[in-house]
Amino acid sequence: MKVRNLTKKLIAFLSLLLVSVQADAGTLLFSTTVDPPGSNVDGATVSAEFSEVSGGQFTLTLTYISADVAGKFDNVAVMTGFVWQADSSAKIEAESAVVATGSQLVKLDKPSKSAVPYSPQFTDVSPYWGFDPDLVGAGTAGGGGSGLPDGTFGSHNLIGDGGSPGGVDYGLVPVLAPGDDYWVTQSPVIESSLVLTFTVTEGTFNPLTDVTSGSFLFGSELNVRSAGGPIIDDTTVVPEPSSLALLGMGLATVAGGRWRKRRRGTNPQD
């Protein structure tokens, strides 16, 4: 009886362990350091991270991690979008563009040459970001430029209603190191991170397997810089090897317990 109860508890524990490993969300991460063309930034470290599809939706989180500034951090260095290539014919629609938790809208304070909080603060910037399903990418509504068709992410691409396309407004900037001059003359912009949410409306699309490459966009002309190779962090397909080994040990223990009980039942002298 004790062996049976122990067996049930062990199976329940191992089942919960297995589910927790499989439930960890996978991501597809592009992270690189590039030189925005025409800017005073020698190294802009940026990232774009796709989530898995859940409930027909997935997210793309854009983050401006840091910048090595030589002179002033100006409009040309603002990250204004991300475009990607995918092996899929699925149809995708943009649902929202939201300032990430822990990030904020900022503006230029000319006397101190620094970024200060914008007022009023708000998080929904959907009316100022566009999505082009043909190009497969999202960006601020500043028009087209180097490497992209004219009018890209213009008024016809806006995710939300009520926006006014123009320049680098609502693009992304990093938290600058002390002493670095901030000189982005358009405002507000987003300090650090933005989360874009998309819905798969037709067909099948999984960013973790279908997105093959990407490029970051900078400045009002959406100058293109390669995102480098993607890094896949997918723990949802199979349990980790250590969990599989533990599961195997548990099943062996269960089987051994039952086998010993049968032996004791058939041969009391054992």
Image: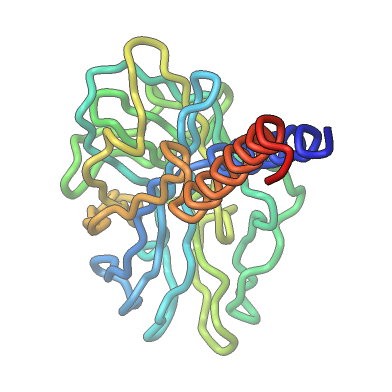
Please state which of residues 110 and 262 is positioned toward the viewer in this rendering: 262
Q: Quadrant of residue 177?
A: bottom right
Q: Quadrant of residue 105?
A: bottom right
Please state which of residues 46 and 90 is positioned toward the viewer in this rendering: 90
Q: Quadrant of residue 116?
A: bottom right
Which residue: 73% across, 38% down? 268
Which residue: 48% across, 67% down? 65
Please state the horizontal and vertical placement of residue 75, each as a whole percent of the image: 41, 62
Q: Is residue 248 visible?
A: yes
Q: Is residue 124 visible?
A: no
Which residue: 34% across, 55% down? 30
Please state which of residues 252 and 12 is positioned toward the viewer in this rendering: 252
As displayed, is residue 118 above or below residue 69? above
As displayed, is residue 48 above or below residue 157? below
Please state the horizontal and vertical placement of residue 159, each as a whole percent of the image: 49, 26
Which residue: 76% across, 32% down? 4
Whether residue 53 sits left or right of residue 153 in the image: it is right
Whether residue 183 sits left or right of residue 38 in the image: it is right
**Residue pushed farthest bottom?**
179
Whether residue 228 sits left or right of residue 237 in the image: it is left
